[in-house]
Image (tube, grey):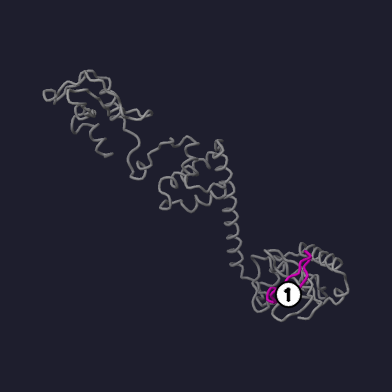
Amino acid sequence: MENFQVIEFFEERRILTAFVVDDRGERLHVITEQNREVNLARKRVIHATPWPAGGKLTRQELVDQLKSIGQRREALKREINLAEIWELLVDDGSGLTTAAMAQQWFGAQVTPDQTAALGRALAEDRFYFKHKAGLWTPHPPEVVTQLQEQQRREEAKRQELVEAGYWLREAWEGREITDPVWRERLITILKDLAIFGPDGEFWEQGQEYLAQAKLTKPEAAFKILVKLGVFQPDENLDLYRYGAPLEFPPEVQEAAHRLSASRDWPDPYERQRQDLTGLETFTIDGERTRDFDDALSLEKTSSGYRLGVHIAEVVSFIAKGDVLDQAALERG
């Protein structure tokens, strides 16, 4: 490739124009429309046009001209309908060069800008043509349909990710998820993350959702569930991991109510017991517990102190084999 060429190349998914200052073999020293000097690999060039006049311009004039050329080609590209060109060529199935493709749209006499514009459209195409050995060949109709369906799925997934990130952020900041469908879906995924972690069914999907919401700490899923009122701050996740029943059936609840309302509890071990109700005891359970079943006592004796450990003996109140006993065994 000689010096004084206008070229086009991809830069971060965007096509830029540049001017070749020096051809160095495998690399080209160019000035881009962004007023940058770059040593560009020759294989990155997607279009080239001689432009001797460029070598006579000042640096700023050159950059301005490159911008103008790029804008002109973008405007031409927007007029191109590749679907129509594809319909003209698909039955033939033969490959054409970029210049020949430009003639299909613009007519027999095409300008460098028109050829470059058609090349831009083809380079950005995802459906209609494939490029091989310098030729553009139309995809068969079934391939076009498949590629279009794939894009629809990708776009639906992208939109879902955006929506999930929005609702998770709302919940994290203390606001309710007002969409019932999203609330149910996200609670299912968040529970899976909090309970099973990487072993869960929705681990990868949940991590994508949380990343979209910029929530990357390991405990994020659990904390959101607490904010939503689904979990308590001290929720016992092991109950979920081991599949322990979280609700009691009506007959078990009724038996518990009858037992708690009763004041006449027969004690099968009454004769073996020593009455220590005269001791002053204090519970060792936490402040928030609702099950005070452990206590301590301290007595002064002639030789020192006696520490008493008092544990509620539930077996005295629940008969072996009844519904309460079976419910306890199931959870044990």
- Image coordinates of residue 235 in percent, x first then y, are 40, 37
Q: Is residue 219 above or below residue 62?
A: above
Query: In which quadrant of the rendered image does the N terminus lie?
Result: bottom right
Q: Residue 271: horizontal and vertical position, in percent?
A: 11, 23
| Residue 175 falls inside the magenta stretch | no
Q: Tell me the amino acid under the disc marked 1.
A: Thr
Residue 160 vs residue 176, the one in the foreground? 176
Residue 30 within the segment the image draws in magenta: yes
Above or below 244: residue 71: below
State the SS at label 1: helix
Closer to the camera in the image, 258 or 308: 308
**Crowd tier of the residue under label 1, counting other residues whose Cα lies within 10 Å: few below 14, some 14–19, many 20 or above:** many
Residue reaching furthest to the front: 303
Quarter where residue 45 is shown: bottom right
**Residue 150: x percent and y percent?**
58, 60
Farthest residue toward the left? 271
How many numbered markers are drawn? 1
Above-or-below relation of 26 to 264: below
Question: Which corner quadrant of the image does residue 29 belong to?
Answer: bottom right
The residue at the point 36 percent across, 45 percent down is: 241
Q: Residue at x 82, y 73 (%)?
A: 111
Q: Is residue 257 above or below residue 34?
A: above
Question: Image quadrant for the C terminus?
Answer: top left
- For the magenta stretch, what is the residue range? 29-45
The residue to which callout 1 is attached is 98
